[in-house]
Amino acid sequence: MLLPVPDILLDSEASKLCNEIQDLEAKLVHLQEQAETEDKACSHLSRSIDTLKTQIPHNKSQLNELTNIISLHNSALELKRREAAHAKEFIAAQHAQQASLDALALRFENDCLKSEDRLEELENLNISIKNDYNQWNLTEDERKEVIDRAVQEGKVQSREMAELHRQLEASSIEAATANQACKLQKSKTKTSNMQVENIRKALSAAQEEAAVLRRRLDETELALVERTTALEREARSAIAADEELIKARNQVEIAKGGLDAELAAGKELSMAAASAERRHVDVERRARTVQSLLNDARQDQTVAQMELRQRDVDSKQAKAFAQAKLAQAGHSARYLAELLQKHREMEEAIEGHETVEKSSKERQSVVIAHVKGVKQQNDGLDKKIAELSKQKILLQQERESLKERCLDRETVLSDTQAQSNALDSKAEKLREQLQHHEGALYRVDFQLLMAKRAAALATLAAEPGIGLHNQSPASRRVLKQELQTDLEKSRIAQKKQVRTVWDVEAAAQHVGDAASALQEEVNKISEQQKIEELALKTAESNLRASTIARENAQMAVDRASMTLARSQKGFADKARTVLQLSAAVEEGELSFKNRASELENKLQELSVDHHAAVNALQASKNALTPRTVAVSTASATLSTLQLKTQLATPAETEERKEKTATTEGGVAGVCAELQRQVEELQAALATAEADCDVLEHALTAQKEATALANRCKLKVYS
């Protein structure tokens, strides 16, 4: 029997409504997935914010370390500046000493000029003696001997003159070398001062950059806190939207109670779907806002990290440059410190002890500030522990809500399975109806065949020669009307059967589509179950992670307390070390004072010996004058005797020759005495050179004492 058409239309409308309900459920599932992804993004963002908060104290500690290093560099620069001032004073003393040496060289040059004048007088005297000898009546051999002696004496005097000239040139070269050394030392001092100034400027720039970086870190931290609060508000709004979506889904499930109620509530569901879509759009907009805020936070974080890395690289480069310049300044300062006087070093050691006391006080204040910082970190860790406990409670609540969602999904799955079973039974009925309609089609085909056969018979009857023409017109009209009626009925039945077949095929196609849609819905629900199970596992892992984070925070608190105890112990050790170093500095000062007094006494003795040697040299030079006068007197006497010899008798001549020989012997004795005095002068000069060596040894001892004082100061400062 044929199925009525209104029932099929009602089923099609019911299937359309079911499809709309399924679409709404799919949208609800999609919105729930988006809400869960937003929850995950919020949790990830909170973890990243916590990570940034944990990185901020580390960056602050690095900035504090850089500040301490800069303060140490400033103290070192102050020491180098003081050493440069002492070096300038020592250079001034060296200039004064150089002036005294120049005056001494000028006086020595004047003495040399006087000696040259005296030698010229002696040469003139020798020439006169030679002329007198030429006038004598001497033999050729005697004349040669006299000339040879005079030549030898001239050579000796010329050698003495050359020696005096060499000494004068050596003294002038030493004076020029000393002047060049002083100029070089001035240039080095100026260069070191410029380098120290550049280092101070670089350190001040580094301090300003560190302050700017600290301000930027504080601003970044405030911005992160504000964005965290905004994200929390967005997360709460997303949770509210999720609750509204759950309410809409409950309304949809209530709407499944009956077909009439569903048709009546179709408009309300469409309105709810529209509002849900609007909320979905709002949630998507909020999600985009949250994502943009998250991207901005990440960009700010990357920019801050890049700036930190760049500042770190710049600080390292500045530190390396400062270390190199400090090494150069230290080299030049050590070179200058080798020339410092002992009493200046003692004053600097006393000032160094005072600076050590100041630095110890500063370090004590730094340690106290560090202790306060550790306490603040402990307070921050307590706050973080409280926040983690709150997050744990929230995660537990989220876990409960996820369990409830799983139960709701199970009920939805059971309802969907029941609907699928009902649709299967309906499809079975439709298959039976299809078979019934196929039998009806077979019957219609048979009726059509019979109608065609009747039409063929009627056509044959209408032709001439057939027995129908023999019938009466009334019977022919009746027969024709019957045939037309049967043909019309068969056509109407055929149209009805074709329409019924089409409706059945459409219903079967609709049922197949509904079955495939239900299968897809079942697959989606199973996937959603898997996702919710995964979310539940993720929540459990987050809970475990929060527990681990709390334990780590407690361990960090313990480590901070241990670090505080170690820092207090280290401060006590440093205080004891400072006391020991102060005692060692006092002992070093006493030893330095004793050594300085010994060196001063030795220098006074050496200066006395040097003055005595100079006086002896001057006395020897003064003693040359009467000797020269005696030589000239002897020469005059010798010439007088020669004249008398020429005028005397042979006996007187013999006597005069004996006297002349005696006079020549006296002259030779005088020359020998002069040679001995020259040797004594050379010995005195050698003694003076030895005294200069002793003075150099004393200066070396001063350098060693200066180096020892510098090492003690470095130990105290370190």
Image (cartoon, rainbow, N blue to C red):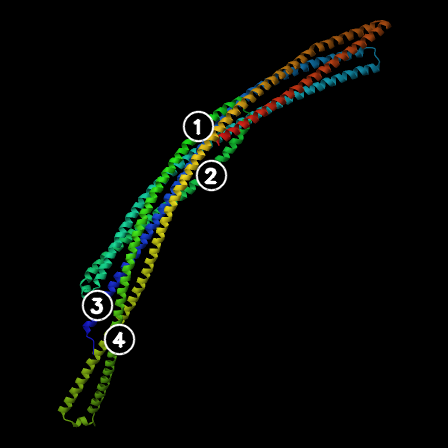
The residue under label 1 is which amino acid type? Answer: Lys
The residue under label 2 is which amino acid type? Answer: Gln
User: Residue 649 sits in which quadrant?
Assistant: top right
Calculate the distance from the C-alpha at mark 4 to the C-alpha at mark 2: 86 Å
Q: Earlier in the sequence, mark 3 or mark 4?
A: 3
Helix, strand or loop at mark 1: helix
Q: Earlier in the sequence, mark 4 or mark 1?
A: 1
Front: mark 1 or 3: 1
Calculate the distance from the C-alpha at mark 3 to the C-alpha at mark 4: 20 Å
Calculate the distance from the C-alpha at mark 1 to the C-alpha at mark 2: 29 Å
Could you tell me how many numbered marks the image carries? 4
User: Mark 3 sits on what residue?
Assistant: 13
Front: mark 3 or 2: 3
Helix, strand or loop at mark 2: helix
User: Mark 4 sits on what residue?
Assistant: 431
Percent position (x, y) of residue 440?
A: 23, 81
The residue under label 3 is which amino acid type? Answer: Glu
Calculate the distance from the C-alpha at mark 4 to the C-alpha at mark 1: 103 Å
Percent position (x, y) of residue 93?
A: 54, 21
Front: mark 4 or 1: 1
In this rendering, position of residue 5 left or right of residue 534? left
Percent position (x, y) of residue 683?
A: 69, 18
Quadrant including the N terminus: bottom left
In this rendering, position of residue 266 left or right of residue 119? left
Q: Earlier in the sequence, mark 1 or mark 3?
A: 3
Marks 3,4: beta carbons within 8 A: no
Residue 248 or 372: which is nearer the viewer?
A: 372
Answer above or below: position of 674 versus 254: above
Q: Which numbered circle lies on residue 317? A: 2
Measuring 43% from the left and 36% from the top, which residue is drawn there? 567
Front: mark 1 or 2: 1
Say few, some or many: other residues with alpha carbon within 10 Å of mark 4 (under 14 / 14 to 19 / 20 or more).
Answer: some
